[in-house]
Amino acid sequence: MFDSIVLGVDPGVAKVGLAVIAVRDRKATLIWAGTVTTPSDLAEATRLARIADGVAASVAQYHPDAVALERVAWNRNQVSALQVARATGAIMATVARAGLSVEEYGPNEVKVAVTGMGNADKEQVRVALARIHGLHDVPDQPDAADAVAVALTHILGSRMRAVARAGGR
């Protein structure tokens, strides 16, 4: 039915954005987007297990060919970045157990791929997903919308890699 299905992931601890984009006849279609949430009063290991379970459920339901993951941005808050890095590790281990490959994309790489501007804000990314790339029903929830953008970045990069392998034809 589809040529390729990509699960996009915007990692976090409180919320993990997930999105599934399918490509058929070189047209991307948003299949599903949502979030896995973990209450802050849970132990960190329990939160990581819930994240892993949510990713595993998405993989089992949508059978992606690949997973695209936003790379952790090491900003000023290193404690927060460390927590997101742990969540990223749980996600990567879950995906590896399912036999899938993971490609990571930096936040600016995603913004450039989707909007053409590395300094685009979240709303500009969300609008570009719909207006430029024709993806319908992009969620308002920022983490889920970011996951859509990450999945689309992988798809756009896959097209470029295919053209490069074909010698630019």
Image: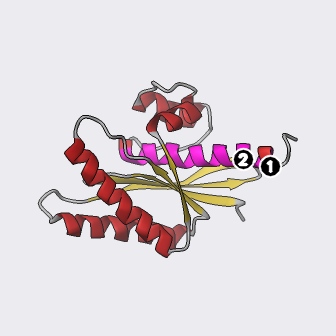
**Residue 9: percent from the left, percent from the top?**
45, 53
Q: Pick the quarter of the image with the N terminus.
A: bottom right
The residue lying at 62 percent from left, 38 percent from top is: 134
The residue lying at 55 percent from left, 37 percent from top is: 129
Q: Which residue is mark 1?
A: 165
**Residue 144: percent from the left, percent from the top?**
41, 48
Q: Which residue is mark 2?
A: 161
Task: Give the residue type that dot 2 points to.
Answer: Arg
The magenta stretch spans residue 41 = no
Which SS type dominates the magenta stretch? helix
Task: Tell me, yes or no, whether the two marked residues, 1 and 2, touch with CB atoms within 8 Å.
Answer: yes
Looking at the image, which is closer to me, 86 or 145? 86
The residue lying at 11 percent from left, 60 percent from top is: 41
Task: Calculate the distance from the C-alpha at mark 1 to the C-alpha at mark 2.
Answer: 6 Å
Where 2 sits versus 138, above or below?
A: below
In this rendering, would 3 be left or right of 85? right
In this rendering, would 154 be left or right of 36? right
Indicate the secondary structure of the residue bearing disc 1: helix
Write down the quadrant of residue 55 in the picture.
bottom left
**What range is drawn magenta here?**
143-163
